[in-house]
Image (cartoon, coloured by chain):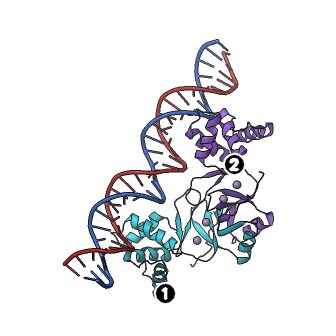
Chain colours: A purple, B cyan, C blue, D red
Amino acid sequence: MIQNLTEHDRENLQESLAKSGQKVTPQREVVFAVLLSKRDHPTVDEVFQRARESMPGLSLATVYNCLETFVGCGLVRQVNHERESTRYCPNLAPHAHFRDAATGRVHDIELPPAILQSLRSILPPGFDSEAIEISFLGRAQGGDAHPTL
Amino acid sequence: MIQNLTEHDRENLQESLAKSGQKVTPQREVVFAVLLSKRDHPTVDEVFQRARESMPGLSLATVYNCLETFVGCGLVRQVNHERESTRYCPNLAPHAHFRDAATGRVHDIELPPAILQSLRSILPPGFDSEAIEISFLGRAQGGDAHPTL
DNA sequence: AGTGAGATTTTGAATCATTCTAAACAGGGA
DNA sequence: TCCCTGTTTAGAATGATTCAAAATCTCACT
Ligand SMILES: [Mn+2]
Ligand SMILES: [Mn+2]
Ligand SMILES: [Zn+2]
Ligand SMILES: [Zn+2]
């Protein structure tokens, strides 16, 4: 079952939406709560299934709309691996992604600022980067990078 | 117009295919030649258009087949950005990709071994990585990272 | 309370890159 | 020549995502 948003998260949602002239709606609250309550990089369809538990009438198109809106105001990131369905991540800290080839699960990998900086430094002059995506593919034995997230 | 394969490239193709029990075919030669002759990370459809100039009867399905075969024997890499069409890259050296948001063009960015190593080092114990993908998104003014490739 | 404008949600259709299917095709032995 | 096997081909199917249009909601203003 999906928790409600904490007061803090609700304010965050409200303010981020307001910045681009948009409002909090029940659907957006539910979708945002789904993302925060289990940070396992769900696909749109997974978000849809989970959100319907608390809001049965919710439509898939609305989930697409909400997620696009959140990406637009910087509340969540899209995560793509190869040609698989897009996944969504509410972790705003700079981080890389590790996809376990065995389970398909996606883990957050902390990205030290120094490494991020050294990465930027490999760009030749004239190349200005707004975003960097780093993704690992491999096997993760047992544990999770963020066991208690 | 697409060049023929050099003797060296043809041998490379022949041997790589042979390793997985596959043969050189006219279609595979043409598709491989297309990839080598303009290393601009073409999409399947772009490869198809270019290849048809020298082999009008070629089918799109065959281009998909050839490219999948090449990826399978390590002759080329797939390059994905967001949800756009997959692109193909015959540069086997470790490198990152820079996508120019203005033009859509994809540039190769050299990746020093030291940086690759420091990236691997951010993985927590238990995470074994077989592949790393690094992609930048931004603007490239004028020049090309590999003007004479 | 009633209206109207604009935003949001909903349904169902459309898109389109990719994959699948099944039928031709090629070509090197037996 | 006749198989055997891998390859190519045309066309249909798939499936995530996007689009279009109608229905619903919000809310400021009367
Ligand atoms: Mn990622
Ligand atoms: Mn890339
Ligand atoms: Zn993440
Ligand atoms: Zn490349």
Q: Is mark 2 within 8 Å of ligand 3?
A: no
Q: Closest to the observer: B63 or A49? A: A49
* Mark 1–mark 2 distance (CA, rounded to whole Å): 48 Å
Return the mark for residue B8: 1
Residue A22 shows in this picture: no
Quarter residue B144 falls in? bottom right
The image quadrant in which ligand 3 is located: bottom right
**Residue A103: x and y, percent?**
62, 58
Quarter residue D4 falls in? bottom left
SS for dot 1:
helix
**Residue A52: x and y, percent?**
61, 37
Return the mark for residue A113: none
Residue B28 shows in this picture: yes
Q: Quadrant of the C terminus of chain B?
A: bottom right
Q: Chain of mark 2?
A: A
Q: Do residues under tags 1 and 2 come within 8 Å of each other at their CB atoms? A: no
Quarter residue A112 falls in? bottom right
**Numbered marks: total:** 2
Q: Chain of mark 1?
A: B
SS for dot 2:
loop
Q: Is residue A58 above or below residue B145?
A: above
**Residue B143: x and y, percent?**
62, 71
Tag 2 residue: A76
Q: Closest to the observer: A66 or A34? A: A34
**Residue B40: x and y, percent?**
53, 70
Judged from this view, the residue extending furthest toward the bottom is B7
